[in-house]
Image (spheres, rainbow, N blue to C red):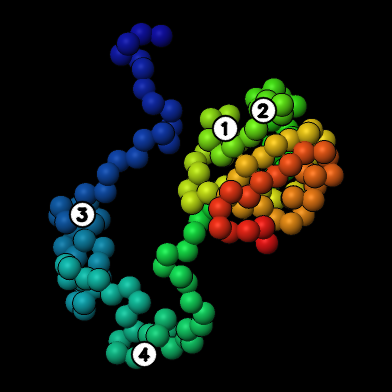
Amino acid sequence: MKLHELRDNDGATKKRKRVGRGPGSGMGKTGGRGIKGQKSRSGVAIAGYEGGQMPLYQRLPKRGFNKPNRKKFAVVNLGLIQKFVDAKKLDAKKAITEDVLVESGVVRRKLDGIRVLAKGDVSAKLTLEVTGASKAAVEAVEKAGGKLTVTSAQAAE
Protein backbone atom coordinates (compact mmCIF):
# COMPACT_ATOMS: atom_id res chain seq x y z
CA MET A 1 0.00 0.00 0.00
CA LYS A 2 1.24 3.46 -0.90
CA LEU A 3 0.23 6.88 0.40
CA HIS A 4 -1.62 7.74 -2.80
CA GLU A 5 -3.68 4.54 -2.48
CA LEU A 6 -5.13 5.42 0.96
CA ARG A 7 -8.83 6.16 1.03
CA ASP A 8 -11.84 5.85 3.33
CA ASN A 9 -13.99 2.74 3.40
CA ASP A 10 -17.07 2.77 1.18
CA GLY A 11 -19.90 4.59 2.95
CA ALA A 12 -17.62 6.10 5.60
CA THR A 13 -18.00 9.63 4.23
CA LYS A 14 -20.96 11.33 2.66
CA LYS A 15 -20.84 14.42 0.49
CA ARG A 16 -22.60 17.51 1.85
CA LYS A 17 -25.88 18.32 0.08
CA ARG A 18 -25.43 21.69 -1.68
CA VAL A 19 -28.86 23.25 -2.01
CA GLY A 20 -29.82 25.92 -4.54
CA ARG A 21 -26.89 25.46 -6.93
CA GLY A 22 -28.69 25.18 -10.27
CA PRO A 23 -31.01 22.69 -11.97
CA GLY A 24 -28.23 20.20 -12.71
CA SER A 25 -27.72 19.51 -9.01
CA GLY A 26 -31.26 18.19 -8.53
CA MET A 27 -31.61 20.57 -5.59
CA GLY A 28 -31.79 23.88 -7.47
CA LYS A 29 -34.49 26.57 -7.65
CA THR A 30 -36.70 25.76 -4.64
CA GLY A 31 -34.00 23.73 -2.93
CA GLY A 32 -36.21 20.81 -1.92
CA ARG A 33 -38.74 23.00 -0.11
CA GLY A 34 -41.57 22.63 -2.60
CA ILE A 35 -43.51 25.63 -3.85
CA LYS A 36 -44.90 28.61 -1.89
CA GLY A 37 -46.32 28.54 1.60
CA GLN A 38 -44.91 29.30 5.04
CA LYS A 39 -42.56 26.33 5.09
CA SER A 40 -40.86 27.38 1.88
CA ARG A 41 -39.81 30.67 3.43
CA SER A 42 -36.94 31.23 5.84
CA GLY A 43 -37.45 31.78 9.56
CA VAL A 44 -40.18 29.18 10.06
CA ALA A 45 -40.81 27.97 13.62
CA ILE A 46 -44.15 26.21 13.78
CA ALA A 47 -43.56 23.10 15.87
CA GLY A 48 -46.74 22.50 17.86
CA TYR A 49 -48.72 25.11 15.91
CA GLU A 50 -52.00 23.73 14.59
CA GLY A 51 -53.18 26.49 12.28
CA GLY A 52 -55.09 28.41 14.94
CA GLN A 53 -56.81 25.32 16.38
CA MET A 54 -56.25 24.87 20.10
CA PRO A 55 -52.96 22.91 20.26
CA LEU A 56 -52.88 19.43 21.74
CA TYR A 57 -50.66 20.41 24.67
CA GLN A 58 -53.25 23.03 25.68
CA ARG A 59 -56.25 20.72 25.22
CA LEU A 60 -54.94 18.04 27.57
CA PRO A 61 -55.78 18.37 31.28
CA LYS A 62 -52.97 19.33 33.63
CA ARG A 63 -52.68 17.47 36.94
CA GLY A 64 -50.35 17.34 39.86
CA PHE A 65 -47.65 19.62 41.07
CA ASN A 66 -43.88 19.50 40.89
CA LYS A 67 -42.25 21.18 43.84
CA PRO A 68 -39.62 23.57 42.46
CA ASN A 69 -37.37 23.25 45.55
CA ARG A 70 -37.72 19.50 46.07
CA LYS A 71 -34.74 17.58 47.37
CA LYS A 72 -32.93 15.23 44.99
CA PHE A 73 -31.17 12.38 46.74
CA ALA A 74 -28.46 10.12 45.34
CA VAL A 75 -29.84 6.60 45.79
CA VAL A 76 -27.69 3.67 46.89
CA ASN A 77 -28.76 0.08 47.42
CA LEU A 78 -27.41 -2.08 50.23
CA GLY A 79 -26.37 -4.77 47.74
CA LEU A 80 -24.02 -2.30 46.03
CA ILE A 81 -22.45 -1.23 49.33
CA GLN A 82 -21.89 -4.91 50.19
CA LYS A 83 -20.30 -5.48 46.77
CA PHE A 84 -17.85 -2.62 47.38
CA VAL A 85 -17.03 -3.98 50.85
CA ASP A 86 -16.34 -7.43 49.35
CA ALA A 87 -14.10 -5.82 46.70
CA LYS A 88 -12.15 -4.05 49.51
CA LYS A 89 -13.09 -0.62 48.11
CA LEU A 90 -14.92 0.19 51.36
CA ASP A 91 -13.67 -0.54 54.87
CA ALA A 92 -16.50 -2.14 56.86
CA LYS A 93 -14.67 -1.59 60.17
CA LYS A 94 -14.70 2.22 59.84
CA ALA A 95 -17.81 4.40 59.79
CA ILE A 96 -19.09 4.82 56.25
CA THR A 97 -20.16 8.43 55.68
CA GLU A 98 -21.48 10.12 52.55
CA ASP A 99 -18.04 11.48 51.70
CA VAL A 100 -16.54 7.98 51.93
CA LEU A 101 -19.25 6.66 49.56
CA VAL A 102 -18.40 9.39 47.01
CA GLU A 103 -14.62 8.84 47.29
CA SER A 104 -14.92 5.08 46.80
CA GLY A 105 -17.13 5.58 43.74
CA VAL A 106 -20.33 3.97 45.06
CA VAL A 107 -22.16 7.19 44.11
CA ARG A 108 -20.97 9.87 41.75
CA ARG A 109 -22.12 12.91 43.74
CA LYS A 110 -24.02 13.65 46.93
CA LEU A 111 -26.72 15.98 45.50
CA ASP A 112 -28.94 16.91 48.49
CA GLY A 113 -27.79 13.82 50.37
CA ILE A 114 -27.55 10.07 49.98
CA ARG A 115 -30.50 7.77 50.60
CA VAL A 116 -29.98 4.07 51.28
CA LEU A 117 -32.52 1.54 50.01
CA ALA A 118 -32.84 -2.12 50.95
CA LYS A 119 -32.35 -3.80 47.54
CA GLY A 120 -29.82 -6.59 47.81
CA ASP A 121 -28.58 -8.23 50.97
CA VAL A 122 -25.90 -7.08 53.38
CA SER A 123 -23.75 -9.49 55.41
CA ALA A 124 -21.00 -7.18 56.68
CA LYS A 125 -21.32 -5.36 60.01
CA LEU A 126 -21.60 -1.78 58.73
CA THR A 127 -21.80 1.59 60.43
CA LEU A 128 -23.52 3.92 57.98
CA GLU A 129 -24.18 7.65 58.35
CA VAL A 130 -26.42 8.99 55.57
CA THR A 131 -29.07 11.65 54.94
CA GLY A 132 -31.92 9.19 54.43
CA ALA A 133 -32.79 5.51 54.54
CA SER A 134 -35.83 3.32 54.07
CA LYS A 135 -37.18 1.40 57.07
CA ALA A 136 -36.33 -1.89 55.35
CA ALA A 137 -32.72 -0.73 54.85
CA VAL A 138 -32.37 0.20 58.54
CA GLU A 139 -33.75 -3.20 59.57
CA ALA A 140 -31.48 -5.08 57.13
CA VAL A 141 -28.33 -3.35 58.43
CA GLU A 142 -29.30 -3.92 62.07
CA LYS A 143 -30.10 -7.56 61.31
CA ALA A 144 -26.53 -7.96 59.98
CA GLY A 145 -25.26 -6.51 63.30
CA GLY A 146 -24.52 -3.03 62.01
CA LYS A 147 -25.94 0.43 62.62
CA LEU A 148 -27.54 2.87 60.15
CA THR A 149 -27.78 6.49 61.34
CA VAL A 150 -29.91 9.04 59.54
CA THR A 151 -28.14 12.38 60.02
CA SER A 152 -30.72 14.90 58.79
CA ALA A 153 -34.17 16.17 59.72
CA GLN A 154 -35.62 13.82 57.12
CA ALA A 155 -36.23 10.73 59.26
CA ALA A 156 -36.38 7.20 57.93
CA GLU A 157 -39.58 6.71 55.99
| Residue 76 spot, x, y in % from top left | 64, 45
142 left or right of 8 in image: right
Q: Which of 24/144 is in front?
A: 144
What kind of residue is marked 1? Val
Looking at marks 3 and 1 on the same chain, the residue that comes earlier in the sequence is marked by: 3
Q: Measured along the vertical axis of the image, is residue 3 above or below residue 156?
A: above
Q: Which mark is residue 100?
A: 1
Instruction: Tell me: residue 100, above or below residue 136.
Output: above
Q: Marks 4 and 1: which is nearer the front?
A: 1
* Element type at mark 2: loop
Q: Could you tell me which secondary element the residue under label 3 belongs to?
A: loop
Pointer 2 or 1: first along the chain: 2
Instruction: Look at 41% across and 67% down and name the residue there.
Output: 68
In the picture of the structure, the residue carrying the numbered disc 3 is 19
Determine which residue is flagged by label 2.
Answer: 94
What quarter of the picture does the C terminus occupy?
bottom right
Q: What is the crowding at mark 1: few (fewer than 14 residues within 10 Å), some, or many (at least 20)?
A: some
Mark 3: few/some/many CA within 10 Å (<14, 14-19, 20+): some
Residue for badge 4:
54
Please say if the residues under marks 2 and 1 sit with CB atoms less than 8 Å apart.
Answer: yes
Secondary element under disc 4, as helix, strand or loop, is loop
At a point 34% along the width and 40% down the height, the residue shown is: 14
Q: Are marks 3 and 1 in contact (CB under 8 Å)?
A: no
Q: Is residue 107 left or right of residue 5?
A: right
